[in-house]
Structures are given as C-alpha cells and as structure tokens.
Image (tube, grey):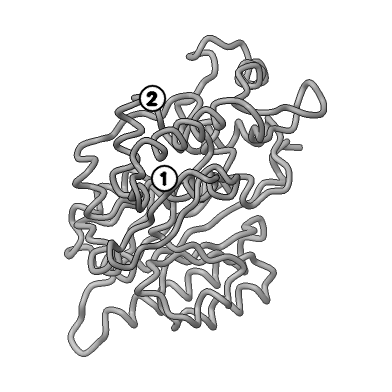
Amino acid sequence: MRNDMSEERIAIFLDYENLAIGARENLGQRRFDYAPIARAMAERGRVVYRRAYADWSRFDEDRRDLTRHHVELLEIPQRMGTSRKNSADIKMVVDALELAFERDYITTIVLGTGDSDFTPLVHKLRELDKRVIGIGVKESTSKLLPPACDEFLFYERLEGVRTQSADADTESEEETPSLDELVISTLAGMQSTNDEVRASTLKRAIVRIDPTFNESDHGFRGFTELLRHLADRKVVELNGPRRDPEVDLVTGAGPAQAAFDLLAAVVAETAGKNGAPLSGLKTELVRREPKFNERAVGYRGFLQFCKAAAARDLVTMRWDEKRGDYLLTVSK
C-alpha cells in the first residue's frame, strides 16, 4: 500500500484564453504565468493531469512556458462559421466529465476560468463526488461561478503573481528561495487547507514544488533532522511523534517576531504626523535588513504581513482616500 494514498489527486483544466486575456487586461501581464497555479496546487495534493485549451497560434510564448510545466495543450482552431470560444468550452466540458467518470482516483478537479458558462459543469462534477476548485482573474470572473465551487482562488492573490507594476519594481528578479522561505511558505500554504501538517506530508509538498529538493544538499541526513534544526532556531514548532511530528508556524519569539519588530521600528522612524505610507515601506525594511522577506516568515505578501502586525497591535493601519494607500503608525 502506498503511504500517500490519502493525498488529493488533482486534475487541472484551463480555459486558457479566459485566463490569459483577463490577466493581460486587468493585471497588465504581457504573458500569463502558470507557475503560481502549479505551486498552489502542489500545496494541496498531487497533480496527475493538466490540460489547457486555446487557439495556440495566439499564444506562442505561452506554449513554451506551459510545456515546461508539463501541461498538455489542446488546439482549438478558429473555423469558418463556428465560435472558437464555444468549441473550447464544449471540449473542456466533455473532457472533464469523461475524466470524472473514468478515473475514480481523481479526487479534485480544478477549472481555470472565470466564465459562468462552466457553472453547470461544476454542479455535475460535485454530484459525481469530485471536489471542484475554481481559479480566475477577479475582474473577469462572473459572480455566479465562485459560489458554485468548493473553493475558488483569485489568480492575482496566488503567491508569485506579479502585476505590471510589480514587474517593474523587481525586474529580472528570479532568485531561488532560501531553505527557510521554501519550508515556511509551503507550510503556510498547506495550513490554509489542512488542519494538521505532518513532516512527511510537508516534505512531499516541497518536492512537488521543487522536484530537485533534497535535504542532504543542505547538510542534513533526513527531513526531520532539518525540521529540528529549524525548530531550534524558532522558525517552526514541532509536536507529537518523533518520527513524523506535526509541524506548525512559530507564534512566539523567533524570526517572525524579529521581522515584526523591524517593521514597528521603521514605521516609528518614518511615520511623521500622518503615518508611513505602505508603498515604499518594504524598500525601507530591506534597506535596513537586506535579508528581510515576508515569505520567509509565512506571509504571502507584504500587505498580509502588515495586517498581521496590526492584528498583533504592533502597528495601526488606516486607508487614506487621497493617497490611495494605507498609512501605518505605531500602536500606542
């Protein structure tokens, strides 16, 4: 018996034109980036099936990126007297239903689209006892689709998604995440959908995200030894059996607290009378501490990190309509 049979088995179907056009028009992306979807699904289970539907003559660069992620490309060419969109929709519906009937081991079906035309498909898949996750760009997603799904993820909120403005700020920045960041960001993602994360399931999720990962490359004889090293540094907390402990994020002192203290100190020095604007604040933190990265302490974005600090009464945040930005001050 395989020891990972309890994992989700995931099939992904992408209405690619809907996603790519939505990302281009609403997020300023010149090319749709599939990698954040791949990572989000790897955190949830084992992806065993990937298909994308489009007229690929319109997405030549995208084809190469999807091929690198092992996505099967289904060509839906424009024909005289037919609608390319309807052809793609029909083919995707037929394939999803066929898979649901013929592959009992598939537990979760992911539909990458914001089109409400797929709502009846969602209902049918759930009738067939499949968990359905939807993914779409918020501004181009129908309000009817998310409530029909078991879970719906807005693409722009996934870790790693960059808008045009973010691309300008981090031009050509493609750094390999540190060991701490890889473990913490994966753990944080898994905890959003799992009550309990064991060392063994965390290791499998990390390997799905980075198939080249091996703890021996970092000087450890086993993954549990690596986790105990991180626990000694208060990066994670371990509980339960020694062989396969439960892994949790640190809530007390440790790197996260040091990051919050740094934020509070920078806000105190830069707030002035009205408060320190959120935009530009991360740049100042990195200038003070070059190793600062909110993802390394379990947060998917800097705004989420600041809101966590506010929830801990370290800072206060208020929205300024004139600036179109948050202003932060140190809590009294």
Residue type at mark 2: give it.
Answer: Lys
- Crowding at mark 1 (Cα within 10 Å: few <14, some 14-19, many 20+): some
Q: In terms of depth relative to the viewer, which is nearer, 332 or 283?
A: 332
Q: Can you say whether 15 is above or below 244 in the image? A: below
- Crowding at mark 2 (Cα within 10 Å: few <14, some 14-19, many 20+): few
Q: In terms of depth relative to the viewer, which is nearer, 229 or 71?
A: 229
Residue 141, by quadrant, is bottom left
Give x and y (percent) for residue 8.
Answer: 64, 51
Would you name the residue on which mark 1 appears? 302
* Residue at image location 34% in from the left, 25% down from the top: 290
Give x and y (percent) for residue 228.
Answer: 67, 18
Could you give the CA–CA distance between mark 2 and mark 1, rounded to whole angstroms? 14 Å
Q: Can you say whether 237 is above or below 316 in the image? A: above
* Residue at image location 53% in from the left, 9% down from the top: 219
Going from N to C along the chain, the mark reached first, 2 or 1, is 2
Q: Of helix, strand and loop, which one carries label 1?
A: helix
Would you name the residue on which mark 2 appears? 291
Residue type at mark 1: give it.
Answer: Phe
* Residue at image location 43% in from the left, 72% down from the top: 92
Please state, as top left, top right, bottom left or bottom right, where the C terminus lies in the image.
top right
Q: Of helix, strand and loop, which one carries label 2?
A: loop
Q: Can you say whether 280 is above or below 20 in the image? A: above
